[in-house]
Image: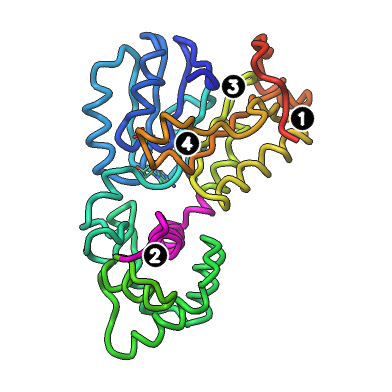
Amino acid sequence: MHWLRVQPDDVVVDATIGLGGHSAALGSRLGSGGTLIGLDRDPEALRKAGTVLAGLACRVVIRQANFGECAALLAETGIGRANVIFADLGVNSEQLDDPARGFSFQADGPLDMRLDPDAPTQASDLVNRLSEKELGDLIYENAQEPASRKIARRIHEARRSGRIMTTGHLARLVCEAVGVDPSSRRSRIHPATRTFQALRIAVNDEMSALDRFLEAAPDLLHAGGRIGVISFHSGEDRRVKRDFLRRRGEGVYRIVTKKPVVADEPERDANPRSRSAKFRVAVREPAGEAWIAAGGAPEPDEGSDETGDES
Ligand SMILES: C[S@@+](CC[C@H](N)C(=O)[O-])C[C@H]1O[C@@H](n2cnc3c(N)ncnc32)[C@H](O)[C@@H]1O
């Protein structure tokens, strides 16, 4: 909340409303002249968030949408530009904890992993259809899994005796591939973590949605408006960091989080899923006369706690 600086009459876009936790905090800073727009691909999340946000004073607009299509959505609502655009990437805790959604190797369930249950491709489609090389590339590129080739080979071999349709089956194959018995493992991280993450990213085309979101964001922000993104793995964080640095070079953003903001020790203990979270924030600057002519406003004063950029 400190970094996003919501003012009572602002337009705030929560691009990943999830279970409404961040939206409730952002919305509590908005008055009756403010607007909160919440998006999510998952209709189940929208239903839950709607209940959480029912008491807010501001106008609340909730839509099932991919944040990659944020620009079209803002145009459609007639709002145009926002003061704050926020995204908290990945999956929410209920998606992760519900075996029927197929995101987790902790309990057996269908190998699904779709954020939007109407999307055409499930994780089982990729696992059973891709070639060994394609699978290895996917697991390496999306999650930097060092054993990606071994895992792809084991999956490919196992397919000869039948389709792989459950999270439990896939998790066992990954453990066999890397020669680890998960019940006796010493590491805190399950051997299948990165394989599951890589498949989820592919099933939901997460990197390309993030690229489209970052590409559209400057034109959706008022001058002095803020974009904040929480990411959970290096591939996402690298994209956010590079986008902010490029825009800074173009005079479009000023980066205000000198280093990515991370959870402190007490928060990590209370909420272990916050361990890998990185939060970056940039402020929209006026860049060139054309932009100002298109409706740019002067930038408000900054507090002394923000010390410029990240080197
Ligand atoms: C980490 S959770 C957000 C949790 C939320 N900030 C809260 O306080 O409850 C990420 C959410 O983003 C959604 N999501 C992921 N990719 C999306 C996309 N491309 N477009 C819209 N929503 C997306 C997921 O369905 C999930 O609910």
Residue 151: % across, % down = 45, 76
Q: Amino acid at mark 1?
A: Gly
Q: Amino acid at mark 4?
A: Ala
Residue at mark 2 to residue at mark 3: CA–CA distance: 40 Å
On the image, numbered disc 1 is attached to which residue? 251
* Secondary element at tag 2: loop
On the image, numbered disc 3 is attached to which residue? 225
* Secondary element at tag 1: loop
Residue at mark 1 to residue at mark 3: CA–CA distance: 14 Å
Horizontal side of 18 relative to 74 (left or right) equals left
Along the line of sight, the residue nearer the viewer: 295 or 206: 206
Q: Are marks 2 and 3 in contact (CB under 8 Å)?
A: no
Residue at mark 1 to residue at mark 4: CA–CA distance: 22 Å
Instruction: From this view, report whether residue 41 is shown above or below residue 255.
Output: below
Tell which circle, 1 or 4, labels the residue nearer the N-terminal end: 4
The overriding secondary structure of the stretch rendered in magenta is: helix
Horizontal side of 267 relative to 251 (left or right) equals left
